[in-house]
């Protein structure tokens, strides 16, 4: 946990090393915790750390540092900071930066660089990390003079958090850290002539949008990540209250609109419920808020929502007409746009459209796995549903990537923003454990659960040791099916059931936890789920639960990649009361 | 999105800093926007470079290119001058294999294109020609039968006609929302 803030002397106007100036700026930017790993070219910065009230978390692999900074930023709504040395330290951050880039997460990643006179000489641990990171960051800096640090590092934070947020790589040479100069703090507004994030919207576009909304008979709202990032949840609630328009969420939009709200349809797209996708295909107006029409959301673009006019509210102009051609683009902050729309739309009710969507549900309740008998087996979706019940839907859940991620999205109902953290855009396996650790630092009072597969957890399981060292209390639910489940599912559906390179041997996760001085629990029966969750909640420190779930389970419904959105593989119906055919035929 | 893809010309003002050309080139590569030609040079304003970028794009793609360029922190101003009246020029140097008896003929041909001989040797001469890409292309075609030893040409540089200078204001409405 982050120790309480201590005072530190005001050194403004004194001669300091570049390393000290780095920390002076970080502290003034409000940084309380950072995640990193020392090494040759960043050692001066580490040497100065004890002088400053910043808690440093020593990770076990730099990828973990970047994901922790990411998880911290997502949970806190601020900027996450990670630190690494040059060369391999810096390149190990890249996956985390790319993850943050695709999900628009503000991170400042500080890397040491070889002394400036050695740059370009293939010096020991030299990598052109600004070059490497160019396409996976919002901006990069290479700083070789202590005099430049205050200006550029402030800019780095400003760029990371403003506009459409994103990661900024800040590469600073070793000599710039060692050399001294007079530290002069400057808190004047940052002026970057080529960077002017613009939130203002255009009246004519708003007017067109209002007209479309008034005229629509079958409108639907898409709530994306932008709702959460713009803190527009209450504005959206008010907009829905006035317009009675149902809401479908993207994966990253989950929690932006309460899951249990009766106008919330749930998640759309590849693993959205069939009636949600059918409602989209039948709609006459899509109001897309802070989302980017990712291919996992649209399916085949040729037959996507052909009857619908489209309003696209988005902060980033480069997203307009990228995947889907829209009728009314509104570039701006989604919260402000909603506030202005609320003023202009007439209150209406839409009983016919709502009833129509209800009609689309058909037998889906029967197909809903939480209504299916378990037949004495442990199904992943049941574990997630139980976790939802026993945490009363209040946990901050960090999911990894794969089947469990989709089950989490389907069965853990998030009623509040920033309660689900997941790598949506890049789909980075290994993200969950370190990201949850970062989130726990941001929200120490929240119950933080990791939902992760046996594959993903092994990618970054070394960070369990960091959990132990930091005495961090997170709860890790491993959905262990002995396979790379999502790939196995695709092999089952699309590759003739040839399970190439997907069966996976795992260590004994209980022993693994215990080897780290943590608590481990194994569960292989449904009736033991509650006790395990309760025990995890009551146990201090990090707890790892190894849920041994059915191996041949699949995530339904599913739009096969490239298929039309309404063309879904549905979950088979259970016949009889005590068994489910798909689960019967797929014995291991 | 069944729009016509055409050659489009963008004038891009960027900060004159190390690595900025790389950022622009990387953006085009990453977004799969194919560059026909790219020219960069200093301007009359200290610290500001000007690029002329020609690439194939339909209207939607052009707006996205513009919007993506604006996402670069060092990009100051983008002007899609495709549909504006503009002066477009390339410069070429052509080394032609000619011995004395054909020299006059080649020089005469060059004159039609307002090309200048900038180097003459017993077996070759170098012509300098500038003009629209078409014009330069035509001269090169005519010279081919004589044997071209070496050819170098710049990409297009463009400037809009009339007195209006560029404005370094905020992005235009079209860039913000296509």
Image (spheres, rainbow, N blue to C red):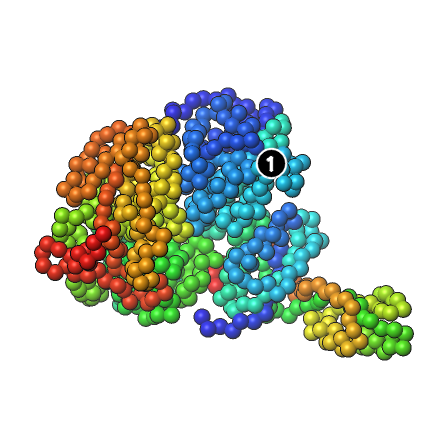
Expressed as whole percent of the image width and height from the top left, the position of residue A206 reads: 39, 60
Question: Residue drawn 32% across and 30% down?
Answer: A515
Whether residue A248 is visible, yes or no, is: no
Residue B90 is left or right of residue A126, and the answer is right
In which quarter of the view is residue B40 placed? bottom right
Q: Nearer the viewer, residue A510 or B58?
A: A510
Q: Mark 1 lies on which chain?
A: A
Residue at the spot x=62%, y=48% of the render? B19
Q: Position of residue A449 (x, y in %)?
A: 28, 39
- Residue that badge 1 annotates: A124
Residue A93's place in the image compared with A358, above or below, is above
Q: Quarter holding the N terminus of chain A?
A: top left
Q: Quadrant of residue A342?
A: bottom left
Residue A535 lies in quadrant: top left
Residue most extreme to the left: A577
Tell me where residue A136 appears, x and y as whole percent: 49, 49
Q: Residue at x 43, y 51 (%)?
A: A102
Q: Using residue A428 as the reference point, say whether residue A197 is left or right of it.
A: right
Instruction: From the viewer's perspective, tell me whether residue B139 is left or right of residue A288.
Output: right
**Image position of A262 with respect to B57: above or below:** above
One can see residue B63 in this view:
yes
Vertical order, B16 against A518 (above or below): below
Q: Residue A485: x percent and y percent?
A: 30, 51
Q: Nearer the viewer, residue A356 or A217?
A: A356
What is the secondary structure assignment of the residue under circle 1? loop
């Amino acid at each position: 946990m982050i120790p309480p803030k201590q005072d530190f002397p005001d050194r403004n106007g004194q001669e300091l090393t570049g390393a000290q100036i780095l920390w002076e700026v970080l502290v003034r930017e409000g940084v309380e915790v950072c995640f990193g790993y020392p090494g040759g070219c960043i050692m001066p910065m580490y040497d100065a750390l004890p002088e400053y009230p910043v808690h440093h978390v020593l990770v076990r692999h730099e990828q973990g540092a970047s994901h922790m900074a990411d998880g911290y930023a997502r949970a806190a709504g601020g900027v996450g900071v990670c630190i690494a040395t040059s060369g391999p330290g810096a390149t190990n951050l890249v996956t985390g930066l790319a993850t943050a880039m695709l999900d628009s997460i503000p991170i400042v990643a500080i890397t040491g660089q070889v002394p400036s006179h050695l740059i370009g000489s293939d010096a020991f641990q030299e990598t052109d990390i600004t070059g490497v990171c160019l396409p996976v960051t919002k901006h990069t800096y290479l700083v070789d003079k202590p005099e430049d640090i205050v200006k550029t590092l402030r800019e780095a934070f400003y760029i990371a958090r403003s506009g459409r947020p994103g990661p900024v790589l800040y590469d600073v040479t070793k000599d710039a850290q060692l050399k001294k100069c007079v530290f002069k703090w400057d808190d004047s507004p940052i002026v970057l002539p080529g960077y002017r994030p613009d939130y203002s919207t255009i009246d004519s576009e708003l007017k067109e949008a209002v007209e479309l909304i008034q005229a629509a008979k079958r409108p639907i709202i898409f709530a994306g990540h932008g709702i959460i990032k713009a803190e527009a949840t209450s504005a959206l609630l008010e907009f829905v209250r006035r317009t009675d328009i149902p809401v479908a969420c993207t994966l990253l939009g989950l929690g932006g609109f309460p899951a249990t709200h009766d106008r919330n349809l749930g998640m759309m797209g590849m693993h959205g419920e069939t009636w949600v996708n059918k409602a989209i295909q039948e709609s006459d107006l899509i109001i897309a808020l802070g989302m980017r029409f990712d291919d996992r959301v649209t399916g085949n673009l040729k037959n996507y929502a052909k009857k619908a006019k489209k309003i696209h509210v988005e902060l980033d102009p480069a997203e307009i007409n990228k995947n889907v051609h829209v009728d009314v683009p509104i570039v701006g902050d989604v919260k402000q746009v909603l506030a202005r729309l609320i003023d202009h739309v007439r209150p209406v009710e839409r009983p016919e459209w709502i009833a129509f969507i209800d009609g689309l549900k058909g037998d889906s309740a029967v197909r809903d796995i939480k209504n299916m008998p378990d037949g004495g087996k442990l199904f992943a979706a049941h574990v997630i549903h139980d976790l939802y019940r026993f945490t009363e839907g209040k946990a901050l859940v960090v999911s990894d990537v794969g089947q469990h991620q989709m089950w989490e999205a389907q069965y853990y109902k998030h009623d509040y923003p920033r309660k689900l953290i997941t790598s949506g855009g890049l789909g980075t396996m290994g993200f969950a454990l370190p990201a949850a650790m970062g989130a726990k630092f941001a929200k120490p009072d929240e119950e933080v659960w990791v939902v992760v597969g046996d594959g993903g957890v092994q990618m970054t399981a070394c960070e369990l040791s960091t959990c132990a060292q930091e005495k961090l209390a997170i709860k890790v639910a491993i959905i262990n099916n002995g396979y790379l489940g999502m790939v196995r599912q695709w092999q089952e559906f699309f590759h003739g059931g040839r399970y190439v390179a997907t069966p996976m041997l795992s260590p004994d996760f209980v022993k693994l936890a215990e080897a780290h001085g943590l608590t481990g629990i194994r569960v292989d029966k449904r009736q033991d789920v509650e006790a395990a969750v309760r025990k995890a909640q009551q146990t201090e420190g990090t707890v790892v639960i190894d849920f041994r779930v059915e191996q041949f389970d699949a995530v339904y419904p599913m739009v096969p990649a490239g298929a039309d959105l309404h063309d879904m593989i549905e979950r088979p119906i259970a016949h009889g009361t005590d068994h489910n055919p798909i689960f019967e035929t797929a014995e291991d | 999105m069944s729009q016509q893809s055409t050659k489009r010309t963008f004038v891009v003002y960027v900060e004159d800093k190390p690595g900025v050309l790389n950022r622009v080139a990387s953006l085009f590569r990453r977004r799969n926007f194919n560059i026909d030609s790219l020219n960069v040079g200093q301007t009359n304003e200290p610290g500001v470079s000007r690029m002329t970028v020609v690439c194939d794009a339909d209207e939607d793609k052009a707006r996205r290119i513009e919007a993506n360029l604006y996402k670069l922190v060092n990009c100051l101003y983008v002007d899609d001058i495709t549909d504006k009246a503009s002066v477009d020029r390339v410069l070429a140097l052509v080394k032609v294999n000619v011995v004395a008896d054909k020299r006059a003929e080649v020089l005469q041909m060059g004159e039609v294109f307002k090309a200048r001989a900038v180097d003459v040797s017993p077996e070759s001469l170098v012509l300098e020609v500038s003009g629209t890409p078409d014009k330069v292309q035509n001269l090169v075609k005519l010279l081919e039968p004589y044997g071209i030893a070496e050819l170098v040409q710049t990409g297009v540089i463009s400037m809009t006609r009339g007195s209006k200078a560029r404005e370094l204001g905020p992005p235009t409405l079209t860039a913000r929302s296509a």
